[in-house]
């Protein structure tokens, strides 16, 4: 139900919702349409998805459907709506970034909100992850490049403190990191694959989200766009 997407699926589901009189089918189609729209980067699609999920919670909460999963073969739409609603209310583009409070390797408290006024690249990662390690050089280069700019690369790492400290001592990583060994913050942000990157503007609003490696050129373009919005149009820094 949550994997339907694309213009053909959207049109088909809308037709079902408009024409079908069966309440169960209409509820399932409404939920499926909402889930398909929820992965869009278009603000109108996301607003429509949010409205449809709220509609499902009110009008079709008691609708159930069978599932092949042995542990919970019957799913209710009321329960199924909770996760996509959470993501839309807290993690979608254009929303204020949730507060993060943790400690760095030195035991100092770190708050995401303390960087308000700066562009923040929030990076969920771990040292055992090859794609994460492949971004170390990009991290070092961009931290250096934007050293005199209102920019922060903030890591949230699920390794233990000793491992992170070792990487910092060896100068493999160059940014401040919050130790998230218990994965409390990662779970709050619904991290499912790493690296998981969020670009947050100076007002604390989520502007970009990407799960997986992003190359240096693309990150530079994203960061420059947000930095330029702080002081008006300026020539971008050269891409190294």
Image (tube, helix red, strand yellow):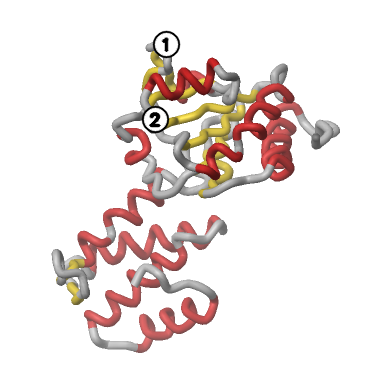
For the N terminus, the image quarter is bottom left
Relative image position of residue 150 (x, y in whole percent): 66, 22
The spot of residue 115 in percent (x, y) is: 53, 21
Q: Around disc 2, counting alpha carbons within 10 Å, would you say few (fewer than 14), some (14 to 19), or many (20 or more)?
A: some
Among the 4 quarters of the image, the one containing residue 171 = top right
Tally the numbered discs: 2
Q: Is residue 91 above or below residue 68?
A: above
Which quadrant holds residue 101? top left
Disc 2 versus disc 1: distance between alpha carbons? 15 Å
Q: Which residue is mark 1?
A: 106
Q: Residue at x 55, y 35 (%)?
A: 200
What label sits on residue 159 in the rendered view? Answer: 2
What secondary structure is marked by label 2? loop
Q: Is 202 placed left or right of 48 in the picture?
A: right
Q: Which-is-in-front pick, marks 2 and 1? A: 2
Identify the residue at horizontal 69%, vertical 29% (top origin): 142
Name above or below for residue 13 compared with residue 36: below
The residue located at (47%, 72%) in the rendering is 5
Badge 1 crowding class, 10 Å Cα cut-off, few under 14, some 14 to 19, many 20 or more, is few
Q: Residue at x 46, y 25 (%)?
A: 112
Determine whether the residue tagged by mark 1 lies in a helix, strand or loop.
loop
In the figure, residue 229 lies in which quadrant? top right
Q: Nearer the viewer, residue 165 or 121?
A: 165
Question: Where residue 134 sits: x, y (%)?
Answer: 60, 40
């Amino acid at each position: 139900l949550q994997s339907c997407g694309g213009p053909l699926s959207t049109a088909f589901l809308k037709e079902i919702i408009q024409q079908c009189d069966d309440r169960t089918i209409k509820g399932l189609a409404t939920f499926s349409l909402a889930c398909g729209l929820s992965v869009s980067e278009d603000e109108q699609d996301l607003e429509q998805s949010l409205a449809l999920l709220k509609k499902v919670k009110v009008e079709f909460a008691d609708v159930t459907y069978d599932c092949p999963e042995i542990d919970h073969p019957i799913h209710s739409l009321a329960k199924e709506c909770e996760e996509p609603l959470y993501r839309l209310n807290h993690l979608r583009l254009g929303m204020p970034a949730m507060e993060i409070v943790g400690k760095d390797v030195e035991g100092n408290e770190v708050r995401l909100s303390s960087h308000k006024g700066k562009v923040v690249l929030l990076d969920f990662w771990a040292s055992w992850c090859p794609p994460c390690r492949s971004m170390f050089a990009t991290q070092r280069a961009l931290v250096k490049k934007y050293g005199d700019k209102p920019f922060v690369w903030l890591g949230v790492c699920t390794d233990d403190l000793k491992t992170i400290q070792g990487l910092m001592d060896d100068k493999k990583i160059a940014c401040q990191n919050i130790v998230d060994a218990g994965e409390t913050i990662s779970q709050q942000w619904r991290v499912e694959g790493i690296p998981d990157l969020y670009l947050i503007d100076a007002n604390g609003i989520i502007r970009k989200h990407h799960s997986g490696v992003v190359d240096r050129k693309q990150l530079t373009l994203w960061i420059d766009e947000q930095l330029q919005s702080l002081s008006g149009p300026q020539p971008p820094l050269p891409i190294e």
